[in-house]
Image (cartoon, rainbow, N blue to C red):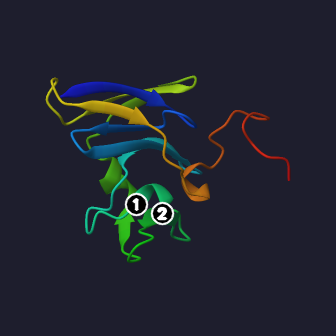
Amino acid sequence: MLVVTLAAEGRGNCVTVDDTPYIYAHTARGGFLMRARCPHRGGPLHLAELTPEGRRLVCPWHERKTSMAAMSANLPAVRSGSTVTAVVPHDPGATVVVSHVPLSADLARDCAAPGLGKEAA
């Protein structure tokens, strides 16, 4: 297992470990770490929308629905301020790259503190 740190939002919000990208998503149900690729075809789940009940992600490539619980299973993470520390299933010597990826509005909901990082309506 490998411990990684990434930003909860904005610059540095994605950590790629041995070609597997992870993001911190924040929905109305709370924040969680998830793999940023669809398990079916590798689509960009960081751009996914939520189903109306808010429990599943809809892949933007092929519209397959994936459980948020399944995507975050076995990925313990703790947010402290603007950073997230997580444990990912990789060897400690794995290659780690921190970068930025855009998130869909559904996965970045209320991520910023009030008045910070949000455009005026």
Mark 1 and mark 2: Cα distance apart in space? 7 Å
**Amino acid type indicated by mark 1:** Pro
**What residue appears at the point 54 percent right and 52 percent down from the top-left corner?**
103
Rendering coords of residue 5 (x, y %): 39, 25
Residue, disc 1: 44
**What residue appears at the point 16 percent right and 24 percent down from the top-left corner?**
92
Q: Nearer the viewer, residue 99 or 7?
A: 99
The answer to whether residue 92 is above or below residue 61 is: above
Residue, disc 2: 48
**Amino acid type indicated by mark 2:** Ala
Q: Depth-wise, is mark 1 or mark 2 nearer the camera?
A: 1
Farthest-out residue, bottom:
62
Residue 119 left/right relative to 24? right
Q: Secondary structure at mark 2?
A: loop
Rendering coords of residue 45 (x, y %): 41, 59
Residue 76 left/right relative to 89? right
